[in-house]
Image: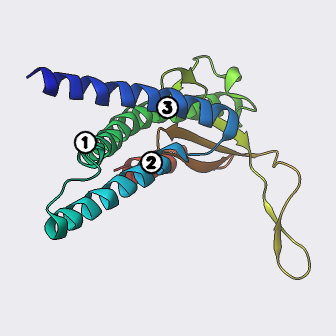
Amino acid sequence: MKKILKFISEVIFGIIVWLILVDIQWTFFDSHSIENLIFIAFGIFLLTLIIRGIYWVFKKKRIMKFAGFGTLYFLILSITMILTNVIYGKIAENQYIELLKDIKEYKIAKGHIPKELSELPTKHSNVYGIIPHEFIYEGYKPFIWNGIGFDESKTDSETEKIVGYKTPMGYTKYRIADDENIDDVIASVRKNVW
């Protein structure tokens, strides 16, 4: 029983460390590579477990005792990460819809979407690790014709924004504009979240 509780506490500790690292990577590096490293580690331990099994079959000797525990740990950690991401995804989705509703009310009152989220009467927070952060709200760079093809403009659109939310394993972004029906965006969010 003590071994099981110790294992569970190690997995919980791993998830907390992962969430803290997710906060750091999204805040400073805008990437989602840490979970990939955990999946790679799981793959390496799984490979060592297979090698250990093959070695035992032919030599009848045990090698790499850490492989079994490592494989189990990273498997459980990976599954728990995915489940944690699903929970965060559902929380973020609900918070994001509330944000979109607030943007819709602002647009009805002012005739345009806000330039910054700080213009909204309510402060909205997106939790994608441990610490709450502001939702993604950045300028949309439209594509312009260069004579041969379409290039992304170097300047942000005055009437369009990219708005989105992050989860521990990625982010979701939508383009909204002054003439956008935000109810359609809300419907799209509800349809696309797993």
Query: Which of the two discs, 3 and 2, labels the residue nearer the N terminus?
Result: 3
State which quarter of the image contains the N terminus. top left
Q: Residue at x 53, y 34 (%)?
A: 22
Label 3, on which residue?
A: 128
Left or right: 191 with respect to 123?
left
**Pointer 3 or 1: first along the chain:** 1
Position of 5 relative to 90 (above/below): above
Q: Which residue is mark 2?
A: 189
Q: Residue furthest left?
A: 1
Q: Please say if the residues under marks 3 and 1 sit with CB atoms less than 8 Å apart.
A: no
Which three-letter amino acid code belongs to the residue tagged 3?
Answer: Tyr
Q: Indicate the position of residue 44 as horizontal and vertical percent values.
A: 39, 56
- Mark 3 and mark 2: span between their CA atoms? 17 Å
Side of 128 relative to 5 (left or right):
right
* Residue sitting nearer the eye, 21 or 160: 21
**Residue plotted at (23% across, 65% down):** 55
In front: mark 2 or mark 1? 1
Spatial separation of the CA atoms under disc 2 and disc 1:
40 Å
**Disc 2 secondary structure class:** helix
Amino acid marked by disc 2: Val
Residue extending furthest toward the right:
147
At 22% from the left and 29% from the top, the residue drawn is 7
Task: Looking at the image, tell me whether mark 2 or mark 1 is earlier in sequence order.
Answer: 1
In x, y percent, where is residue 136? 63, 37
Q: Position of residue 190 (x, y in %)?
A: 38, 47
Taking depth in this image into account, of 107 and 98 the one nearest to the observer is 98
* Element class at badge 1: helix
Q: Which residue is mark 1?
A: 69
> In this rendering, does residue 181 appear at all?
no
**Location of residue 2 with respect to 158 vertically, above or below:** above
